[in-house]
Image: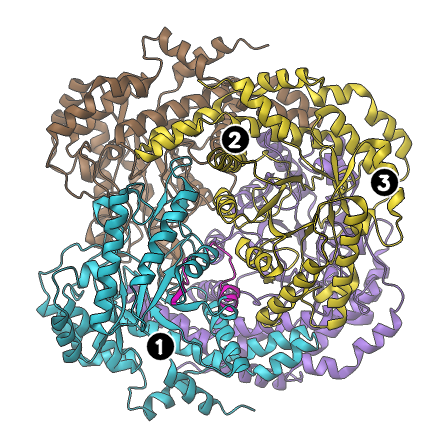
Chain colours: A yellow, B purple, C brown, D cyan
Amino acid sequence: MIQHSDVLERSLNDFAIEVPSWGFANTGTRFGKYLQATAASTLEEKFADASQVHIFTGKCPTLALHVEWDVPKGTTISSVLELSARYGIRPGSINPNTFQDQSYKHGSLCNEEAEIRAQALDHIFYSIELAAGLSSRDISLWFADGSNYPGMANIRKRKEWMEEGLRQAHDHLGPQHRMLIEYKPFEPAFYHTDIADWGMSFLHARHAGPQARVLVDTGHHYISQNIEQIVAWLLSEDMLGGFHFNDRRYADDDLTLGSIDPYQIFRIFAEIGHYEWETNTKADIAYMIDQSHNVKNKIEAMIQTVTTAQELYAKAALLDHEALEFHRAHQEIIDAENVYKDAFATDVRPLLQDWRRAHGLPEDPLKAFRASGYLKEVARQRQGRQKESAAYA
Amino acid sequence: MIQHSDVLERSLNDFAIEVPSWGFANTGTRFGKYLQATAASTLEEKFADASQVHIFTGKCPTLALHVEWDVPKGTTISSVLELSARYGIRPGSINPNTFQDQSYKHGSLCNEEAEIRAQALDHIFYSIELAAGLSSRDISLWFADGSNYPGMANIRKRKEWMEEGLRQAHDHLGPQHRMLIEYKPFEPAFYHTDIADWGMSFLHARHAGPQARVLVDTGHHYISQNIEQIVAWLLSEDMLGGFHFNDRRYADDDLTLGSIDPYQIFRIFAEIGHYEWETNTKADIAYMIDQSHNVKNKIEAMIQTVTTAQELYAKAALLDHEALEFHRAHQEIIDAENVYKDAFATDVRPLLQDWRRAHGLPEDPLKAFRASGYLKEVARQRQGRQKESAAYA
Amino acid sequence: MIQHSDVLERSLNDFAIEVPSWGFANTGTRFGKYLQATAASTLEEKFADASQVHIFTGKCPTLALHVEWDVPKGTTISSVLELSARYGIRPGSINPNTFQDQSYKHGSLCNEEAEIRAQALDHIFYSIELAAGLSSRDISLWFADGSNYPGMANIRKRKEWMEEGLRQAHDHLGPQHRMLIEYKPFEPAFYHTDIADWGMSFLHARHAGPQARVLVDTGHHYISQNIEQIVAWLLSEDMLGGFHFNDRRYADDDLTLGSIDPYQIFRIFAEIGHYEWETNTKADIAYMIDQSHNVKNKIEAMIQTVTTAQELYAKAALLDHEALEFHRAHQEIIDAENVYKDAFATDVRPLLQDWRRAHGLPEDPLKAFRASGYLKEVARQRQGRQKESAAYA
Amino acid sequence: MIQHSDVLERSLNDFAIEVPSWGFANTGTRFGKYLQATAASTLEEKFADASQVHIFTGKCPTLALHVEWDVPKGTTISSVLELSARYGIRPGSINPNTFQDQSYKHGSLCNEEAEIRAQALDHIFYSIELAAGLSSRDISLWFADGSNYPGMANIRKRKEWMEEGLRQAHDHLGPQHRMLIEYKPFEPAFYHTDIADWGMSFLHARHAGPQARVLVDTGHHYISQNIEQIVAWLLSEDMLGGFHFNDRRYADDDLTLGSIDPYQIFRIFAEIGHYEWETNTKADIAYMIDQSHNVKNKIEAMIQTVTTAQELYAKAALLDHEALEFHRAHQEIIDAENVYKDAFATDVRPLLQDWRRAHGLPEDPLKAFRASGYLKEVARQRQGRQKESAAYA
């Protein structure tokens, strides 16, 4: 019998999760946003809110920054570092934005116009420089590039433009950096998306250079696609750079992690855990949250997400890999499956409480956060700064 | 051999298509909007743009109105009728909005709070009164009501609230009205949507009263669901009220009709045509466009949509229903299928040109519209009124 | 705090699960069958195997019978009742087969030829008489009727034929019977299936008569469709007759229950439990297993399925419905969701062991069954009798 | 204006399509087979039927062979070549079978047991030798390898075994051979499939060696996946080896090509045509049919498929690539799309009739075949020989 607490101690200590700055701001669907009185508007508010998540969970020391919304051209590095120091939260991954500007209507690095491609590349260069200044390691690239109607795009030519742009971006990296390339099957492009699946991310990363890796957003797959198999393949090829965590049922719903299919998230962690067990190495993976929930309170939802991630990670950490390999080798199907089922069925909440207590953290982070009065305070402070944004049907 | 031109003449004369006011305004995805210099902002501009579509296609005499965006409380009926008269376009279906207001965060007619339910019902009452004042027949109801996370909603109670609300709305109808109930599997709700499929619309319509019908949005189905079968069932039960036309590949992509899977639209028309042939009656169906394209010019795309709809409708009109029934009765599979394939393979564009010429319309509506200089003119007029709206990732 | 053991005691005592005769025979995919030395070939072997499942789980007292494979014309009622008595397993639902005979190539009740429709109806009549003779309550109807190519079927006419056939079948029922109508989106028909979704089953059941109900097979839905919502609607309309349990990832994969998405099965039980709590009645639902696994040992997989069903049912039984309603009423989203998450996170295996011990059952049914030596014994007995037999799911 | 007839002449002359031997035999679904009196049972009958397709269409000179069903160990090369000569049909691609034998229950090249892996590899070696003897160029590899339940498979280890096996198979190729690696998301494995998507085929092909290419089966994709984009990528990477043609709506339905979504097949041809136009080279692609229809007559369906393929190929051949590139370069969305729509809307049937007449072929191949009396003759000859034979797709 495995000593659960020991395994968990080691696992949970190593399991840091990055929170996204945009996860504290008002977000919504194309049908509109339901505004929250406590939503963050400024970078300082985002740092402040992120620090709350870290204070109560203990494992969220970094904040993913979105270049256009948080640190646009003109922002001084020192101002960000000052906020970072004040709130005890380090800048995390740097996220360029090459879709918001009107000029990107027909794409960024894949745009037919060389000028727009150059503009996008320039923005990525700037983002890399930001990463250098802020001591961030990862530049996370997601491209909305694609087309909406058959015939309107030269798919092969766009592939070449993307390839060329990514190669130049890679050349711009410092030795300490990684370039993470995200894929997504659709939305906002609805006919074709230039980087639509893991295979396309993979090839682009390979072509770009040795510091490029694939970024897996759990919501960016075809329905019923086996995500953990993709994770296993990427691990096998040493190309898994990180995750954007969220859950979904239909499309890229951006719901909170584990809210729809917790067993799937468990299986992803199981593949990673098995890889680490088998190779006796720690996989170098950036775990990041990227959600866009519209109805839950932002900070509460983030804490809930982190505790859910920890629970599913802990269940996977309890897997008896030796038993698993034994049953697989003997083709004992049911027994191998039951190793998974047993780990998943285990109630790890008491063990997590122990771990939190041992690390000076509140047993129930959400409850403790609520008791802190933070939300009431910021609701007062941020009052009146909410404004409606355009909705449509 | 069927006389193509006769069949087409009868069919196309009867095939009117309603355009939506919001189809001329700037729309987008949750990632932002790419603004068009010629997009309509005011109701007058929408009437003006709609009249262009009608002028060049000849078959779009009505404009669907969105209550909140076009005729909110305070609008005088006479002001709308005056625009209608000026531009030669009648008000079409009336579309209430029970999702935009912040109070609808947790639903409208299905909201847990009785006050919000009353507010939503009141808005629907107002919409019915508008329909009465504007001599519109159809009130189109689409509800964003639903939930995002398992457990948060009492699905059965919400069903009852919806049922009660729809019954009261139906009681409010004039004898000349119809209430069309739309369904949609997901978005903006991502766990459950209170009216998720045709069966739910159907039951609600049956419970509501004899003037209620089902509204089929071609983009609101599970992937691979057989839409034409639903159409056949609704015709069989006398419950098909109308269509919201668009196309899609993944989710509710809201692309222009027939751009992704034209054969599917053809098959929908084929079911309707077969019903009309068999029963020797004209099905009483409201054909309406509801798209949300982000990259095509609004008016051009609307004209393209109408001509595509006419082409697919014309192909279906060429179906040899007697041959179809003969082959079906004799279980001659390939021959029955080939009746469909032959009709679909026929190039109806020359026949449509004949029909247009015969009705004093330009042979190529898009080309003629472009030659008119309208876009250049409105680009100048509407200049500077475009404003950015919030984007997010 | 709810007393878990009391709740579980009441719940599990009432939760009987029917096993299918064909679940003990060799089944496979269209690519072939991997034969098992211990698979059952005769009705006696199926009764024998089912009794093993019942002996070790305590809650599987009935065996679903497939008319063509188990009790074809010519079978004497007494011979079946004798087996039933010998093995302590009662005949359960009666499952007609209107797809296997070559005459059903183009459908059964929906066939264009009246003679074939009569043949199918006659088979259903015979099945109802069997149910009368065997004291079975439910006749489970699943129709493979559909078409493979656009144009080959008159969908509306087939709907009428089905309606007529079901009405006649209903007229044939005894007062003690129920007619359960199953739906399935596709396979073996790949263009349209005559009863494709719950709405079609529902309308057919309503048209057929008061003893007709809808049968929900958990694998017969469009991908991402919300099954628990359908369950809630059917409960609300008093039209839920029963379940065919299995799990799936892609299509109708017929995997063992809870193997892919256990949280979804939990949510189905949660809707039922909530209905029972709210109405203070026991829902009259037939819980039946219908799987077609190709690699697991048949009896072991059945025991695994039953214990998995009990675990998920038990988790749902732990739901704090009052808390749920409180949080819903106050629109406390996260708290309502956490009621679900907490129940699902609870490790019910120790509680189930208590319950089994209290009822004289082995704590670990699978382990106990394996220790019994039954498989070794039947492998010897059934040796050499493996032959391909028709499979279905 | 393009001279349609010239373009078509060149295109159609070059467009040969391979038919599969198993397409003339009885096939079905897991629910059974509807047997056809004219279905082929022997290799000679398959050659005979294939020659009929070639006689009436003029473009099907080769027959794909399935090793286990057509040329199992013990078959003499000379006997096959004699049939080939007699019927004027050359052996086409060679298709090993590593799923039918009971030993492959847990996989072939990915099996945990080294002995089974060796058996599978041996079968592939034998298939390559067959290809050498029969002067076939392509060995088509489709693997059913996968798992049904989470936990039961070591995905990474299986990837390595597959990689090793394919490398050894590649080493066995003659210089004239190509190894085509097919992918499929699911079925018969329902949890994970070892080669599930184009990215996995691609990586395996790259690892295997320079003569390996990817084989695209049009039915082997996630629903809504953009197949033509994959085709474009594979062309761009010089890794597209060939196609298995069929159509589908839900899963791997194996319906006849173009029966469900003809526009998608057109778009695939459009990508190929654009590549050939841009590079001024003929893409080296094996076009093969792989369908498993259960209700249409086998030979008639094959002829229907070939004519449908020719029609869609011809429509794509009419594309005005210069216009396409012009509109793309100028970001004239609607105009670029209309180049596609115009080509697709063109009725190419008269042009195809011209082409057939010019090549001494019947204008309507299906009609001519029916008039030949062949089916009546073989129905008489093959009477009573119907037996279940293994099906696959």
Q: Are marks 3 and 2 on the same chain?
A: no
According to the image, label 2 marks what residue?
A: C236
Is D31 covered by the magenta stretch?
no
Query: Residue C298: where, in percent of width, then height?
Result: 26, 31
How far apart are the two marked residues, 1 and 3, measured between alpha carbons? Answer: 68 Å
- Does mark 3 fall on the same chain as mark 1? no
- Residue flagged by tag 2: what amino acid is it? Ser
The span picked out in magenta is D211-233
Q: Look at the numbered disc 2 and give the secondary structure of its residue.
A: helix
From the viewer's side, name the closer residue of D325 and C114: D325
Residue C372, quarter of the rendered image: top left
Q: Nearer the viewer, residue C170 or B378?
A: B378
In this rendering, the answer to whether C368 lies above or below C181 is above
- In x, y percent, where is residue A109? 69, 64
Residue at the limit of the structure toward the top, as seen here: C358
Rendered location of residue B16, percent (x, y) = 62, 69
The residue lying at 70 percent from left, 66 percent from top is A106
- Quarter where residue D362 is shown: bottom left
Mark 2 against mark 1, which lies toward the viewer?
1
Residue topped by disc 3: A81
Residue shown at the point (58%, 17%) measured from the top left: A351
Q: Chain of mark 3?
A: A
